Amino acid sequence: MGVDLQQDHFTLFGLPRRFGIDRAALDAAYHELHSEVHPDRHAHLPDADKRRAMQWATRVNEAYSTLSKPRPRACYLLQLEGLDAGFESNTAMTPDFLMEQMEWREAVEEARNAGDGDELSQLHVRLRHQAREQYGHLERLIDVDRDYDAAAELVRRLMFIEKLQHEIDDALEALET
Amino acid sequence: MALLHIAEPGMSAEPHKHRLAAGIDLGTTNSLVATVRNGIAVCLPDEQGRTMVPSVVRYRTDGSIEVGQSAVRAHATDPKNTILSVKRLMGRGLRDVAHVEAMPYDFMDSDGMVRLRTVQGVKSPVEVSAEILRVLAARAEASLGGELTGVVITVPAYFDDAQRQATKDAATLAGLNVLRLLNEPTAAAVAYGLDNAAEGVYAVFDLGGGTFDLSILKLSRGIFEVLATNGDSALGGDDFDHRIFCWVLDRANIAPHSREDGRRLLMKAREAKELLTVCEEVPIKASLQSGEEVNLVLTRDEFAHITEHLVRKTLAPMRKVLRDAGLAPEDVKGVVMVGGATRMPHVQRAVAEFFDQEPLNNLDPDKVVALGAAIQANVLVGNRKDEDDWLLLDVIPLSLGLETMGGLVEKVIPRNATLPIARAQEFTTYKDGQTAMAFHVVQGERELVSDCRSLARFELRGIPPMVAGAARIRVTFQVDADGLLSVAAREMSSGVEASVLVKPSYGLSEHEIAEMLRQGMDHAGDDMTARALAEQRVEAGRVLEAIEQALAKDGELLDARERMQIDQSMAALRATLDGADHHAIRQAIDTLSRATDEFASRRMDKSIRGALAGRNINEIEV
């Protein structure tokens, strides 16, 4: 088996290239690779080894942070399928979705202005549920239907939801300080 | 006939040399040094049996330097030259330091890190810290009976890049080989986790003399994985002392005071705080130089009341760290208490309430960080044994970013990313023929540059002239396992490596460090050349030994020609060891290092293949 810094993240962890991921297998592979490459394992060795260890450990961390979270994992998979993200510029959304987003945004704004931390937390929970549902859908689109265009569209929606979640986090943080 | 020694495959033919290593907890109020002896981590005491060294440095008129207890004794009489809590000043400008007005030092107002005028001249906090490190290292070397190969120094998890770099610089000044800067709560988790065979999610609540850290770790099968960290690098036991001090001034109706009186009252305040962990109330009595008398009684309730806002300051980081880790308080299996300040009953109560469980106090909160550092140092230096099959995965505490138009921050590396990490960002030129670019690196979570910590400014030069927008300059941030940032830049279309000139905002330049080193040597009457020679010889020995072991284990990865090259480089290095030219030794080490570069990468590939192969076999069996 070839091993190099350029191989894709799934190959690095010995996992099938799918959105639905065996989290336990991913974590186990991540830990096993770090057991070999982490700089702490090479701290007593010459500089050449230390440099190499840092490069590899950096690579392993980057791969893990991409695959362990669903949205980056989806973006990465689509990228491997040749759908070059362009996510940020391509924001054409259906009116329904935009309307829904506006409603969410207003609800967050209102709770923020009222300083209502409980309401903000509630909104956060509801968004999380919505996102989880969508990710189930995304798994079908990618792994079963292989409808990557539809998947890309859904990923863009999920990015909106994610952004909203960050805004709620920021609002909660602002309330606490 | 001589018998041949045949080594087991993978083992070096020579008996494994035990290298000397120590863990150092460089604290705000007290510092400790620990080491692993016969498999057990112990803090090293002085002749009087005291393990804690007060982090106090006194510069005396006769040119000598006192550190620890003896410096403490002088602090009431010579406050200007007796530096306490220097950790608060590390990597900080004068404007960043809280309670500057209460500090009796003669600060020099300049850009960058604060400086102190002492009877022995202007001192940087880095130099002051180096004095403490020297004393701790000397204690370890005396106790171990040899020179230290390397040390692990702990830092607050919430220390930013400037504070970490300052700590590492202090170690360089003290002549120490730093194996790793280790986050204090992570060190505590190692000591606690290995001791208790803990599994699951743990919180480490670390309230030291001057810093507050909170880390959430997942412990599973020997992996200590930090999920998130938060804190306040300017909150600690000292602030509680200061509150009592203010309360005394207020109650006793004393207004201005001399520096000496201030010191005396602050001492009384600290004593009162410590006594209140065991007593319900304590008397505070003092006769001041001003002729005024202080005679008060502080109760535990009153103390809790006047410091309530300080305890409350720990709550927001607790909520934030859990949110970052994606966890709720009930997900936390245990809360490990670290730092002397966690002895305060109302702090214990607040933590117990937040996590809805009694915190764990079964390790000495003053020693646990040093013990964890010693355990890690022992492994990093190369004394790893089979049972030491554990690993730390730590994170960066604060986001790193670049200044963009309008004073806004563009985040490049997010907080709580697992280290080491690298991220690249591309930029382009703004004008035709532009050959240089300026960048400003900041650290923090806020949107505005002015609300974040300025780390450094750097300039790229040597960009080939092109029309505006044609150049593609890729700036790469790399943060190593110590949490330290380095920056590289390259023009992508031409491949020109632009030179990066970094000017740290609150750090020391390499030139300044070299100068301090030289002065230190002059002062100690050390022969700089002799020391450099000794250091290079040790380094050469280390490199040779490591490569011999690697050749014994993985020699088959090289073909005959490659092997010959390495053997030649090793022989060349050995030949320089007989001479007294430390430059020649250094050059030979560098040559050998280059010669083994490819070998190092093949060995790494081999071990990675081994890791993956092992797992695949298991998977098939399942």
Image (cartoon, grey):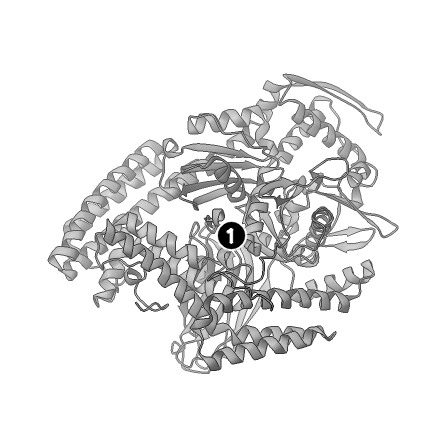
Residue at point 70% right, 72% down? B582
User: Which residue position is annotated with label 1?
Assistant: B452
Identify the residue at the far left of this view.
A145
- Counting from the top left corner in percent of width and height, residue B406 is at 45, 60
In terms of secondary structure, where does tag 1 sit? loop
Q: Is residue A11 above or below residue B30?
A: below
Count of numbered badges drawn on the protein: 1
The answer to whether residue B413 is visible is no
Q: Is residue B299 above or below residue B195?
A: above
Alpha-carbon neighbours of circle 1 within 10 Å: few (<14), some, or many (≥20)?
some
User: Mark 1 is on which residue type?
Assistant: Cys
Which quarter of the figure has residue B536?
Answer: bottom right
Q: Chain of mark 1?
A: B
Q: In front: B559, or B225? A: B559
- Counting from the top left corner in percent of width and height, residue A168 is at 33, 42
Q: In front: A44, or B353? A: A44
The answer to whether residue B401 is visible is yes
- Counting from the top left corner in percent of width and height, residue B574 is at 65, 74
Residue at point 57% right, 43% down? B39
Identify the residue at the far right of this view.
B62
Which quarter of the figure has residue B178?
Answer: bottom right
- Counting from the top left corner in percent of width and height, residue B615 is at 31, 55
Q: Is residue B472 left or right of residue B347?
A: left
Q: Is residue A119 left or right of residue B41?
A: left
Q: In front: A2, or B501? A: A2
- Image quadrant in which the N terminus of chain B is located: bottom right
Q: Is residue B518 left or right of residue A54?
A: right
Q: Is residue A136 left or right of residue B589?
A: left
